[in-house]
Image: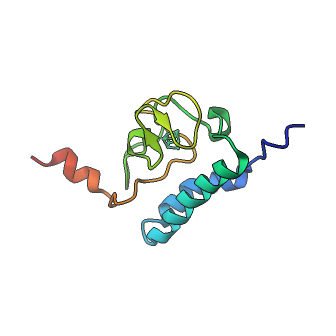
Amino acid sequence: MDTKRPSLGGVRRALTPLRNGLGVVNPETLNGLRRELRDQVASQGRKFSKLEVMYFPFTPIPPGVWLYDCANCEFYRQRTCEIVEGNIFPAGWCGFWVSRVGDKPLSWVAEAVGR
Ligand code: SF4
């Protein structure tokens, strides 16, 4: 058995979108989420696989409070991801999506319709 591959657990993964929602009213929730995911990658000594995080090359989540794609995720880095292995498409999404530090809820609306 590979002891360097601890499971994050389906419950916690499922809570990630919920905690993003809670972050609308309490930004500290999002800071905690970002910190926990980075700590998890550091402690396990590897990034998550795409399978573990339910990665999709195109986001299945319609725009809402935020744009839920990799390009608008805290962990996105030029077609790679800080916490997920492999090439990452900017239009993608995974269960660990977290809004970027400083992005305000619905700020994308002003960008989309503004001059
Ligand atoms: S949603 Fe975020 S954490 Fe998930 S693969 Fe895309 S950039 Fe990485």
Residue lying at the far left of the rendered structure: 115
Apparent side of residue 15 relative to residue 113 in the rendered image (left or right)? right
Q: Residue at x 44, y 50 (%)?
A: 74
Q: Position of residue 3 (x, y in %)?
A: 85, 43
- 3 or 12, which is in the foreground? 3
Q: Residue at x 71, y 54 (%)?
A: 11
Apparent side of residue 35 relative to residue 61 in the rendered image (left or right)? right
Q: Position of residue 39 (x, y in %)?
A: 63, 56
Indicate whether 40 appears above or below 69. Answer: below
- 59 or 34, which is in the foreground? 34
Q: How is the image coloured?
A: rainbow
Indicate whether 18 appears above or below 95. Answer: below
* The N terminus sits in image quarter: top right
Apparent side of residue 98 relative to residue 72 in the rendered image (left or right)? right
Q: Position of residue 67 (x, y in %)?
A: 37, 46
Q: Please tell me how many numbered marks the rendered image carries.
A: 0
Which of the 4 quarters of the picture holds residue 99?
Answer: bottom left
Q: Position of residue 17 (x, y in %)?
A: 54, 54
Residue lying at the far right of the rendered structure: 1
